[in-house]
Image (spheres, rainbow, N blue to C red):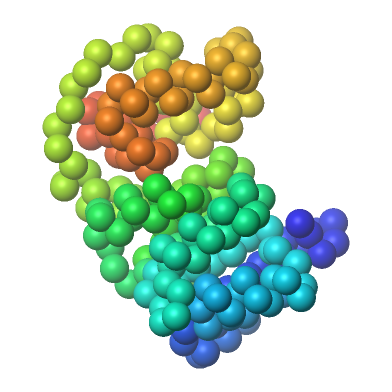
């Protein structure tokens, strides 16, 4: 949902008032975003949404009192489905946290130690493809992931490459001349075959096993 044809509505959920204020200022100065909700925890956010409306993008802190990031994402997905894009902000860069956040329905994960350019890149990528994971987090998760080498068909490998290129299901279907439902089926089957739970795990798997190298992709 957008307040007008140009601005993306944003919700910020973080228990530190100064951090919320800094984010609001950063986003507002960009002129592409309008912060319509600022909340100190998930429960407060859900109560404010009832009065206002659900933003199209929500930045969620991982660690908060009353209702933390896990509980907030789970509650938002249950009540509002896939409509709001959810990006997690955290000081913790651990595989178990990142995996769990994506399992619960997060679209992106950004370290609080990142610069503004990383945050804006994350937002743009999530709006384009529904997914973002920074190179640093990807590297951390790769170092902890176990080695798996099941057989993948040529089509499955092509789909993985396009997903890593942050293409949407519709764009993948067009590129490979497949029906969108067929791509959805392939995506589900690939995750099951690799014992993965989300796109984050798939991207990491592809990089780790040489199925994808962004530096060697054609411009």
| Residue 24 visible in the displayed image | no
Q: Position of residue 193 (x, y in %)?
A: 30, 22
For the point 62% across and 56% down, which residue is it?
79
Q: In which quadrant will I find the N terminus?
A: bottom right
Residue 169's image quarter?
A: top right
Query: How many discs appear?
Result: 0
Query: Up-down: is 216 above or below 182?
Result: below
* Residue located 27% across and 30% down the image: 195
Whole-percent x, y for residue 170 in the image: 63, 26
- Asked whether 29 or 55 is in front, the reply is 55
Question: Can residue 151 be seen by looking at this rendering?
Answer: yes
Please give left or right for residue 85 compared with residue 163 in the image: right
**65 or 182, which lies in front?**
65
- The residue nearer to you, when weighing 58 against 121, is 58
Residue at the spot 14% in from the left edge and 37% down from the top edge: 146
Instruction: Answer above or below: position of 131 versus 147.
Output: below
Residue 74 in percent (x, y) is at 49, 57
Q: In this view, does 53 lie to the left or right of 183?
A: right
Seen as rendered, the residue at the extreme right is 4
Q: Is residue 65 left or right of residue 201?
A: right
At a point 52% along the width and 89% down the height, the residue shown is: 17
**Relative vertical location of residue 180 with respect to residue 48 in this rendering, above or below:** above
Task: Identify the image quadrant of residue 20.
Answer: bottom right
Q: Position of residue 119 (x, y in %)?
A: 50, 63
């Amino acid at each position: 949902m957008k307040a007008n044809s140009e601005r993306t509505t944003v919700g910020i959920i973080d228990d530190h008032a100064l951090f919320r204020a800094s984010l609001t200022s950063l986003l507002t100065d960009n002129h592409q975003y309008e912060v319509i909700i600022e909340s100190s925890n998930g429960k407060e956010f859900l109560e404010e949404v009832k009065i206002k409306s659900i933003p199209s993008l929500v930045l969620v802190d991982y660690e908060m009192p009353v209702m933390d990031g896990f509980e907030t994402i789970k509650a938002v997905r249950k009540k509002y489905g896939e409509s709001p894009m959810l990006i997690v902000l955290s000081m913790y860069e651990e595989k178990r946290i990142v995996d769990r956040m994506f399992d619960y329905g997060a679209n992106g994960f950004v370290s609080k130690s990142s610069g503004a350019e990383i945050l804006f890149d994350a937002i743009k990528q999530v709006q384009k493809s529904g997914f973002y994971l920074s190179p640093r987090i990807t590297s951390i998760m790769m170092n902890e992931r176990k080695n798996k080498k099941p057989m993948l068909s040529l089509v499955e490998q092509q789909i993985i490459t396009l997903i890593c290129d942050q293409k949407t299901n519709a764009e993948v279907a067009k590129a490979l001349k497949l029906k969108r439902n067929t791509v959805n089926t392939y995506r589900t089957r690939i995750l099951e075959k690799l014992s993965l739970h989300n796109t984050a795990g798939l991207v990491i798997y592809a990089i780790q096993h040489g199925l994808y190298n962004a530096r060697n992709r054609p411009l």
